[in-house]
Image (cartoon, rainbow, N blue to C red):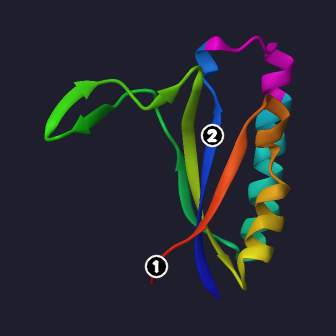
């Protein structure tokens, strides 16, 4: 098994136009996804990220998070997979795409 990190990139939730019902359904889909892949032993960690943070450049810190337009890094997951193809297939099944998000899959250096 190899280790992979998947970085979630998505629109800034403060800009969202989703209804409470859509948000509730989205959260339920995530819960089902975590239950399924956790039971298969493919999840090794991860977390959503808050919107609080600092950017450090040349040793100088400034308030805020990395943002391109309205896109932010919303969270990450650590996966266990046989290879990049399997990690990609797992990532392709996520509910993040329901709200115009996308993911980047990278193998970690062991």
Q: In screen coordinates, is 92 left or right of 104?
A: right
Q: Which mark is residue 109?
A: 1
- Image quadrant containing the N terminus: bottom right
Measured as percent of width and height from the top left, residue 57 is found at: 23, 38
Outermost residue to the front: 58
Binning the other alpha carbons within 10 Å of mark 1 as few (below 14), some (14 to 19) or many (20 upward) gives: few
Residue 81: name its quadrant.
bottom right
Crowdedness of circle 2 by 10 Å Cα count: few (<14), some, many (20+)? many
Please say whether residue 23 is one of the residues in the magenta stretch.
Answer: yes
Is 26 placed above or below 39 here? above
Image quarter where the C terminus lies is: bottom left
Quarter assignment of residue 102: top right
At horizontal 24% and vertical 38% (from top left) the residue drawn is 56
Residue at image location 63% in from the left, 21% down from the top = 13
Q: Is residue 29 left or right of residue 80?
A: right
27 vs 75: above or below: above
Q: Position of residue 88 (x, y in %)?
A: 77, 66
| Circle 1: element type | loop
The magenta stretch is 15-24
- Is 39 in front, or is 5? 5
Magenta residues, dominant SS class: helix
- Secondary-structure class at tag 2: strand
Q: Quadrant of residue 39?
A: bottom right
Q: Disc 2 marks which residue?
A: 9
- Residue in the picture at 85% in, 34% down: 98
3D distance between C-alphas at marks 1 and 2? 22 Å
Residue 104 rendering spot, x and y as whole percentages: 65, 54
Q: Where is 91 relative to 28, above or below? A: below
């Amino acid at each position: 098994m190899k280790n992979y990190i998947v970085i979630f990139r998505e629109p800034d939730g403060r800009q969202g136009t989703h209804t409470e019902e859509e948000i509730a359904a989205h959260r339920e889909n995530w819960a089902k996804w975590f239950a399924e892949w956790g039971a298969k032993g493919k999840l090794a960690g991860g977390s959503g990220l808050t919107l609080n943070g600092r950017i450090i450049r040349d040793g100088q810190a400034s308030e805020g998070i990395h943002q391109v337009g309205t896109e932010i890094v919303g969270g990450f997951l650590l996966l266990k997979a046989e290879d990049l193809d399997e990690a990609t297939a797992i990532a392709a099944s996520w509910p993040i795409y329901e709200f115009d998000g996308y993911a980047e899959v990278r193998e970690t250096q062991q």
